[in-house]
Amino acid sequence: MSRVIVPALTLAAALSIGLIAVAAAHPQAEALPRARLGDLMTNLIQPRHTKLGLGGQAHNWQYAAYEWSELNAAFKTVETRVPRYHDVAMTDWLQMVRPPMEELAAAIKAKDAAQFDAAYSHLTDGCNACHQSTDHAVIVIQSPSAAMFPDQNFAPRTQ
Ligand code: HEC
């Protein structure tokens, strides 16, 4: 081999070992690139907030419990994919929705419609409080007033 090719191959090998080492050290970062918060809100948080509200309105507690854990997991995804926003840790921003999420969990467990309605409205207030604190007061969330998922039946199963 020529004197030029050998160092070039050595360099290429060293680089690829380096890249493999970097990928192995950050497997999660590789699998989950950072995401845009607006996309996560629209695709994960908003539909789950809507469906949780519709399930509660239908007094479908089994479904509400399911959708509550989906929304809870969606908040965790937001925290992982967007760890900081406006120089504040996402986990700190999300304190605005944690107490109402706990309130909702208790209401669902107790199958208490009035408690659910109050907790759901506190959650919605939490969404809006964060939008206001992050200079997005233009985004106003409310309780769903009509079924926005016409292909899904939110009524409890009878059997
Ligand atoms: C971190 C605090 C925070 C919390 C808590 C929060 N949001 Fe957001 N949300 C934002 C920010 C910031 C944006 C704008 C992101 C961007 O576009 O960069 C946003 C955007 C949105 C959007 C996109 C608006 C549009 O029309 O495209 C929706 C919908 C939304 N949020 C719904 C909700 C709902 C529903 C909740 C509560 C269940 C909630 N958000 C809780 C911070 C928050």
Image (cartoon, rainbow, N blue to C red):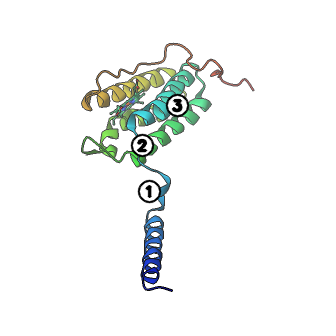
Within 10 Å of disc 3 (Cα), the crowding (few <14, some 14-19, many 20+) is many
- The residue shown at (34%, 25%) is 125
Q: Secondary structure at mark 2?
A: loop
Q: Position of residue 112 (x, y in %)?
A: 51, 25
Q: Using the numbered discs, state the Cα–Cα distance from disc 2 to disc 3 in whole angstroms.
A: 31 Å
Q: Amino acid at mark 2?
A: Ala
Front residue (pair 57, 3):
3
Which is nearer the N-term, disc 1 or disc 2? 1
CB contact under 8 Å: marks 1 and 2 = no
Which is nearer the N-term, disc 2 or disc 3? 2
- The residue shown at (44%, 62%) is 26
**Residue 137 - label:** none
Q: Residue furthest top?
A: 146
Question: Which quarter of the rendering shows the C terminus?
Answer: top right
In this rendering, is residue 134 above or below 23? Answer: above
153 relative to 114 in the view: left or right: right
Residue under label 3: 108
Residue under label 2: 35
Q: Position of residue 143 (x, y in %)?
A: 45, 19
Front residue (pair 77, 97):
77
Q: Amino acid at mark 1?
A: Ala
Q: Amino acid at mark 3?
A: Ile
Which is nearer the N-term, disc 1 or disc 3? 1
CB contact under 8 Å: marks 1 and 3 = no
Residue 55 placement: quadrant: top right
Q: Position of residue 81 (x, y in %)?
A: 42, 46
8 relative to 84 in the view: left or right: right
Residue under label 1: 29
